[in-house]
Amino acid sequence: MSTTPEPTQTPSQRYGWAIMFATGIILSLNYVYLVFYLEDPMLGLGFLGLSLFATSIAYFPYRRGERWAWYTMWIVPAVMILATLREFATDQPGIGLLYLGFTALALVGLLLPFRVFFPRN
């Protein structure tokens, strides 16, 4: 375990990773429910694995400002858009709107710390 202090984070970086981390936790809880609710629990397990993966990336490398983590975290809004489209196609617009809200939240979490990952030279 490292004893070096973490560098001071800008507010946009602090809020950005917190938004992505909270989104991942909430989605993980949602997908735990879906494992038991869906007829095919493997779909819920796949989404659960993806959200836990994104949550761990948000907490460690994204919080440190590693550029590869910023690129990788774009998986979250991409999957959420697909989930939104699926729910609208199956006549469940309420759930689709919920996923659309999570998509917007993930986009804010990605775009807020943009200058941390891509500073001006």
Image: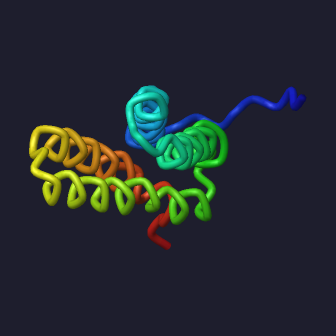
Q: Residue 115: x and y, percent?
A: 42, 59
Residue 69 appears at what percent x and percent y? 59, 57
Q: Nearer the viewer, residue 10 or 26?
A: 26
Q: Is residue 36 visible?
A: yes
> Residue 72 location in percent, x, y?
55, 62
94 lies left or right of 24: left
- Which residue sits at x=48%, y=49%? 43
**Residue 26 visible at all:** no
Task: Out of 10 and 52, give the one closest to the viewer.
Answer: 52
Q: How is the image coloured?
A: rainbow
In the displayed orientation, state which residue is furthest to the bottom.
121
Residue 93 x, y percent position in the rendering:
9, 46
Residue under the point 90% across and 29% down: 1
89 left or right, relative to 24? left
Number of residue marks: 0
Task: Identify the residue at image location x=48%, y=66%.
Answer: 118
Query: In percent of the image, x 19 and y 39: which residue is there?
Result: 98
Where 56 falls versus 43 (above or below)?
above
Q: Residue furthest right?
A: 1
Q: Is residue 17 above or below residue 69?
A: above
Q: Give the answer, above or below, for where 18 lies relative to 99.
A: above
Task: Give the vertical position of 103 relative to 23 (above or below).
Answer: below
